[in-house]
Amino acid sequence: MADEDPYLWLEDVTGERALDWVRARNEESTGRYATGPAFDALREDLRAVLDAEGRIPYVTRRGEYLYNFWQDAEHPRGLWRRTTLEQYRTDAPAWEVVLDVDALARDEDENWVWHGADVLRPGHRLALVELSRGGADAAVVREFDIEERRFVKDGFELPEAKSRVGWIDADRVYLGTDFGEGSLTESGYPRLVKEWRRGTPPDQAVTVFEGRTEDVSVSAHHDPTPGFERDFVHRGIDFFRDELFLRPSDGSELVRVEVPEDAEASVHREWLLVRTRSPWRTGGRDHPTGALLAIGFEEFMAGGRGFTTVFEPDGRTSLEDYRWTRNHLLLTVLRDVATELRVLTPAGEGPWASEPLPGTPPLGSAGILDTNPEDDDEFLTLTTGFTTPPTLSRGVVGGPVEVLKRAPDLFDAEGTAVEQHFAVSEDGTRIPYFVVRPRPGGGADGADGEEGGRTLLTGYGGFEVSLTPDYLTVVGRGWLERGGTYVLANIRGGGEYGPEWHTQAVKAGRHKVYEDFAAVARDLVRRGVTTPAELVIQGGSNGGLLMGVMLTRYPELFAAIACQVPLLDMKRYHKLLAGASWTAEYGDPDDPEQWAYIGAYSPYQNIREQPGYPPVLFATSTRDDRVHPGHARKMAARMLELGHTVDYYENTEGGHGGASNNEQTAFKWALVLDYLWTHAGT
């Protein structure tokens, strides 16, 4: 396309000309696909699933109470509520409503969306509640008294911004927010972190640390653990490099925790944990990428480097997550994208004891949902699978595990098979993917029996995010029940095999993400799972960029594409909203050498006039203040200008998730699934 972008005016998010264009496109697309009894039935079906009473109310422990945020048909904006463990064990717990967001929105005539609450420890009485208008990342902050069920008069309060705020004690908080010119990074996040005292205005808060404008963000937090009270400052240099500083209690200068910038460091009681993203030689030993190392924090700060390796990956395993209880460390490990849970017990010297936690369904996943590291060794686990509804269990390390809640079946999975296969990418790398489909007959020579069928393929491939088997609530009801097949591709760029699975595909290696996804598409056809005329794809955010590249580089492989809240104009992505924070992933398009490889795949710059593109639906949100809606707007406008088959839908609420309540979510997914179903096999 021409050097001068003819559609820059569509980047004016709330400009009247741009919104007129959005309204016209919405009317066209909803008029084609969001009408009639079949669509209405699908939307209502999905709404019923999202609002189902039997869903598990997921909880977080704060002191003696279990807190939950709940949305349903009666409370679309949601209830922040709490109960006791004794009550939670029952089939119908008695919940105390702490804050009714629907009532608050009505009383204040605001479209509030819940963004969470930071509760002061110990005591758990005061909370810093975050509320967003329409679901944007930017939120207001207001202090709330949980026991009195009211906002604190003249308490801590901040206007709408992408703030970072957290308790120090009842009269002080750490604060990063928009203080005006020069206070934000190029990514739009706080550049300054301050200590803010009760009863003073925010602009009188005392500066603790200043980051650089090119950093992603800075923040600070206080650890109130008795006997281990400490304060830390965090500088996010880019998406994958950080610096951690100890803030001494005597007010002296910050002290750097000297670990590699690309390592992840955390402190719990007496322990420092370091997770490596690249090889690290320290203390006379070599530690590989993806290892988890432990050492006494005070020992490390005094110069000691005698780390104990508590996890070391191999070619098939990676560390997905880790959580402390008071006395133990719980690990979530992936082995060929299936989950293993382990409990580790620290030792003064030598290896830490390691035992398995309860297992997971075959080709399923499990994770640690919550722990109570302040007080005890309690943990909550969640186990699930593509066709296995979630089960929430509770245990105490060393004791039995009890099932607290089981979700109901929300779609008919009778006769559905779950398989894992491996495709071979262009460079010979084996790429795992899962297939969920009606149980086929036997086959030979690599084929699986039944030929063809409507198939929905999805993936992400970025930011070290792993995609693991999860219950297909919406896709199950809206796709599998109709006889379709679902495929999840574990392509590079994710974290399924540890940091190297990701780093292979950043910047100049980005092409591997797209080659991997195309390899999975071809392997599905080779196995007889589907045909190009029946294969449709869907992805959002970085997965929306994946969809854009599939559209422009591999159009012959797909029957239709749904591209949601996407990045598409990679020439300008770093100038739009939070885009500057992602240059460590994609590269800097202002650098000619880096633009050479970015420009080779950037979807907006690679649209061509010639026919052959499959039909595509772009869906985004006006209130997305993370990935600019201009990406989807401009791509759709340019393709329409060139005569391609394009549909476009933009929700006026919803933030980066594209929807702010279950009604909007049901509409969004009904539109996407019906669009793809209509074009598959036609």
Image (cartoon, rainbow, N blue to C red):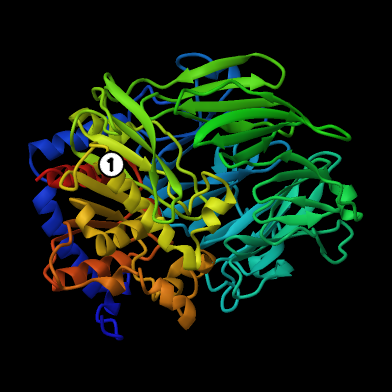
Q: How many marks?
A: 1
Q: Position of residue 45 (x, y in %)?
A: 22, 31
Q: Quadrant of residue 549?
A: bottom left
Which residue of the protein is positioned furthest toward the right in this rendering?
A: 302
At x 57% / y 53%, what residue is drawn? 500
Nearer to us in this view, 553 or 380: 553
The answer to whether residue 50 shows anywhere in this view is no
Q: Position of residue 269 (x, y in %)?
A: 80, 40
Nearer to us in this view, 647 or 465: 465
At x 11% / y 69%, what residue is drawn? 643
Residue 35 higher or lower than 566, as above or below: above
Is residue 48 shown left or right of residue 81? Answer: left
Mark 1 is surrounded, within 10 Å at the Cα level, by few (under 14), some (14 to 19) or many (20 or more) other residues, namely many
Question: Which residue type carries mark 1?
Answer: Leu
Residue 525 higher or lower than 507, as above or below: above
Residue 579 higher or lower than 662, as above or below: below
The answer to whether residue 38 shows anywhere in this view is yes
Residue occupied by mark 1: 524
Is residue 120 shown left or right of residue 471? Answer: right
Q: Quadrant of the N terminus?
A: bottom left
Is residue 610 shown left or right of residue 74? Answer: left
Which residue of the protein is positioned furthest toward the front in this rendering?
A: 445
Q: Position of residue 231 (x, y in %)?
A: 78, 53
Q: Position of residue 544 (x, y in %)?
A: 34, 57
* Element marked by disc 1: helix
Q: Quadrant of residue 322?
A: top right
